[in-house]
Amino acid sequence: MLTINNLTAGYDKSRVLQGATLQVAPGEVVALLGRNGSGRSTLAKAIMGLVPAQGSISWRGRALLGLKTFEIARAGLGYVPESRDVFPDLTVAQNLLLGQKPGAPSGGWLQADVFAMFPQLQQRAGVKAGVLSGGEQQMLALSRTLMGNPELIIIDEPTEGLAPQLVAQVGAFLTTLKAKGVAVLLIEQKLTIALDVSDRCLVMGQGRVVFDGTPAALLTDAAVQREWLAV
């Protein structure tokens, strides 16, 4: 289980997280919702050791604060940033190879598995990632992270800027992760897709979690929607 208690984090002298507390159970899909600037992306970066943080973060009982990002990844966490961060001068196949965890056990994710979910990538396997469309780069970023066989994957705004048909593919990808028992912390603006795939919803506001409940409970809580989600 991912357990976060009283987490504070920020940039330079600006503190973005103001005591965030949350949990993600093994195999659980949790949607992390909120307006821009609420602290969602900072939380993801803090979990992965990319920004300084204080408080407590543990995964399966192991403290993560103070570990390097590659150590956190080796512990079983994967991260797909909003910026995607593919290697532009490497091919699709080479990007996937770089994501593969050395000595991964049998039964993990294979290149054939991600090609089955995203056939476009198989057709572009020999193409440099830098010339892919934005949607194809998102597919590649998601797939490369899976090649590391994470037990928990943090995904930041996977549908941002994508055409409707690609949004549907990302939704199917998330459903597949859920069926295979991979825990997901999903940062997403589109309520429809987030509520469809998640077991539980968290809403962030002013750097802390202000709502924790089921998708059905969120849909019936007009006050939370109005104060923390409405634009």
Image (cartoon, rainbow, N blue to C red):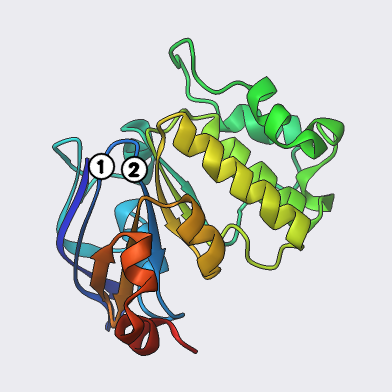
Identify residue for label 1: 25
Q: Please tell me which residue is depicted at 25% across the width and 42% down the height of the picture.
A: 25
Q: Please tell me which residue is depicted at 69% across the width and 21% down the height of the picture.
A: 112
Question: Does residue 188 sit above or below 200 in this rendering?
Answer: below
Q: Amino acid at mark 1?
A: Ala
Q: Residue 185 appears at what percent x and percent y?
A: 39, 52
Mark 1: secondary structure: loop
Mark 2: secondary structure: loop
User: 44 or 94, which is in the foreground?
Assistant: 44
Q: Quadrant of residue 76?
A: top left
Q: Residue 92 appears at what percent x and percent y?
A: 75, 36
Q: Amino acid at mark 2?
A: Glu
Question: Does residue 90 sit above or below 36 in this rendering?
Answer: above
User: 89 or 93, which is in the foreground?
Assistant: 93
Q: Which mark is residue 53?
A: none
Q: Residue 219 appears at what percent x and percent y?
A: 39, 71
Q: Residue 135 appears at what percent x and percent y?
A: 74, 55
Q: Please tell me which residue is depicted at 55% across the width and 68% down the height of the picture.
A: 190
Q: Is residue 156 visible?
A: no
Which image quarter is the N terminus in?
Answer: top left
Q: Please tell me which residue is depicted at 49% across the width and 60% down the height of the picture.
A: 194
Q: Quadrant of residue 207?
A: bottom left
Determine crowd level at label 1: few under 14, some 14-19, many 20+ residues with C-alpha closer than 10 A: some
Q: Is residue 197 visible?
A: yes
Left-right relation of 113 to 9: right
Left-right relation of 180 to 82: left
Q: Which mark is residue 28?
A: 2
Q: Pointer 1 and pointer 2: residues touching (CB < 8 Å)?
A: yes
Q: CA distance from mark 1 to mark 2?
A: 5 Å
Question: Does residue 13 sit above or below 58 in this rendering?
Answer: below
Determine crowd level at label 2: few under 14, some 14-19, many 20+ residues with C-alpha closer than 10 A: many
**Count of numbered marks:** 2
